[in-house]
Amino acid sequence: MAITAYSISGQAYVGGLVGQAFNTTISYSYALGDVAVTDADGSVYVGGLVGAAATVAKIDSSYAKGDVFVATAGEKYVGGFAGSIDNLSRVSNSYAWGDVSVSPTVASEGYAGGFVGLLDQSSLSYSYSTGRVSDQTLDATTLGGLVGKMNGSQAFVLNSFFLQYSGSSLQGVGTDADATGVTGLTQAQFQDTEGFMSLAHGWDFQNIWAPPSSGYYPELYALSPVVAVMAGSQVVSYGDSASALASNQYGGVDRYLLGQEGDSLTLDPTLSTSYGATNDVGNYAVSVSGVSSVTSEKGVAYRVVYVDGSVVVTPRALTITADNISKIYGDLASLSYSVSGLVNGDQISAVTLASDGTDGRDDVGSYVISASDASGTGLSNYAITYETGTLTVTPRALTITADSLSKTYGDLASLTYSANGLVNGDEIGDVTLVSSGANAAAAVGDYAVHASDASGADMANYSITYMDGVLSVLAKSGGNDSPGAGRPLPSFPMAGFIPSEFYAKSFYQGHGQSIALQGGLSGQSPSGEASDAASAAGDGSGSGAGSQLAYGSGGEVAGEMSLTDDPLLTGAVCFSGTSSAMICSGL
């Protein structure tokens, strides 16, 4: 619906289109004429489109372009679009361009706004006004750039604007300096295409609103012959190429309600961008341009608004991972990292790598390796994710060897060991060493020495190998071949007579060695000295247990040598006189 009269006047409720919109809906409507009230008595509600929208009235996608003038003595509610909007009514996606002025004949209360005089328990959203608001006399009229007075807990303004004239101190809502949802803009800000679109949150520029451009405020596609050509925007990761540039058209013959049915138009815009795959993270304009107006096939002239798009370059994903490594206890760790995601020749020169297990003194086990603080060229173009790694400290090889040693038969062995592989000043507290040849009674020969069960504060950090040694038991020196040779020859007294003179000679073969044994009270050899104990034994060797002969001074057999079973005489060679004494040697 449209009213294009140049001037409308009346009393009480006066509007360019409707005096009072009571519980009704108005859409896609406009009024172009001026509205003036000069002779009304009592309260007046005057607006460029409606005098008052009341009781859940709804108005959308409409506008008023005429000036509004009121000069009365009573209360007045004056707006470029509506005198008042009250009682849960809603107005959206609408605008008013006309000036609003009040010139009362006498001082009286009043409210005037560029869009509405009184907003009472109602809402105004996605709308704007551009007219001047003025009070031509100094009275009690309250003025607002968009709303004169806002009243009630359910009254609010949402994402709406008014033209802030140079030198004007008007606030958006005359009665509320802190009101939200209303913003004053200069003409340049209003007509900055991309700038205004970025401010106008919630405004539908594809279906309802034609964006502003130089010399033009926002207009409604449904009521104005305008086409918006919008370059497509896209988001790419740093290093990627942009998709083919494209544009979309909004409004025009598909939206203009006053156009010709079945009409069409053709546009061929030019698109360009400075973006390339090597450009840094940021926003790069996609420019669109072409003719400023186009005539449809059925002769309707359409204004063309061009809206640039953008290529938004976001950081590329880059993953820096601390490598999993292992080292031997006692060694220092050499940490490293791997990288996935670099492009365009960008490089990482350094990464901070840290782990509790890098020192040579750190115990065997697993430790987290953290990566951080990468530096290099082009890294501001990346969203860096750091992944941890694992440092595994493995046991160090340690060899404990039982020392090879020797001892003389009859002695106790003192077993020892050697260690190869200890680091960090670690020490072995004890090692179990065993050998069957260690005791004094072990016979002459070679015996294994076994090492095991090493203990110490840091032994858990080692992988221990035990090596056997050899214990050699050697025969006692001094010419005797029997175990225990070299001890004093004891004499065991026996009752009876000891011959005045005898001489005995014997050889005893023991453990691979011949040990000579001699004894007697006289150094004179008997006749037949060549017949020694070995020949007397009859085997030529003199080995083993049994009897051997002792000769008296006259060559007679003076006694018999024998091996005894007495533990104290184990291994001894003994002989006894005919009735005198027994003498043993070899202990």
Image (tube, rainbow, N blue to C red):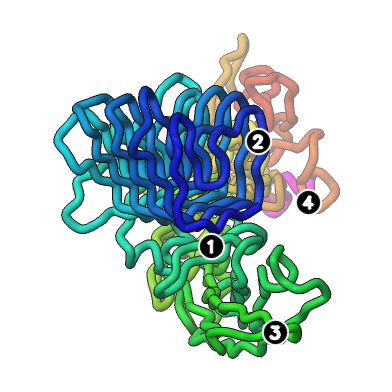
User: Is the Cβ of the residue at disc 3 closer than 8 Å to that at disc 1?
Assistant: no
Q: From mark 3 to mark 1, how far is it between C-alphas?
A: 21 Å
Helix, strand or loop at mark 1: strand
Amino acid identity at mark 1: Glu
- The reply to whether the C-beta atoms of the residues labelled 1 and 2 are less than 8 Å apart is no
Q: Secondary structure at mark 4?
A: loop
Q: Position of residue 326 (x, y in %)?
A: 57, 58
Q: Residue at x 62, y 62 (%)?
A: 223
Q: Which residue is mark 2?
A: 442
Residue that badge 4 annotates = 541
Camera-side mark, 4 or 1: 1
What residue is shown at x 35% (from left), y 63% (from top)?
A: 189
In the picture shown, does residue 102 fall above or below 261?
above
Check the picture and name the quadrant holding the C terminus: top right
- Relative to residue 556, is residue 293 depicted above or below? below
Q: Earlier in the sequence, mark 3 or mark 1?
A: 1
Q: Can residue 503 be spotted in the picture?
A: yes
Q: Which mark is residue 299?
A: 3
Which mark, residue 219?
A: 1
Residue 405 visible to the viewer: no
Q: Amino acid at mark 2?
A: Ala
Q: CA–CA distance between discs 1 and 2?
A: 118 Å
Q: Earlier in the sequence, mark 4 or mark 3?
A: 3
For disc 1, the neighbor class at 10 Å (few under 14, some 14 to 19, many from 20) is many
- Per the rendered image, the range of residues in magenta is 529-536
Residue at (22%, 33%) from the top-left corner? 105
* Kind of residue at disc 4: Ser
For mark 2, does the 10 Å Cα neighbourhood hold few (<14), some (14 to 19), or many (20 or more) residues? many
Q: Residue at x 44, y 43 (%)?
A: 9
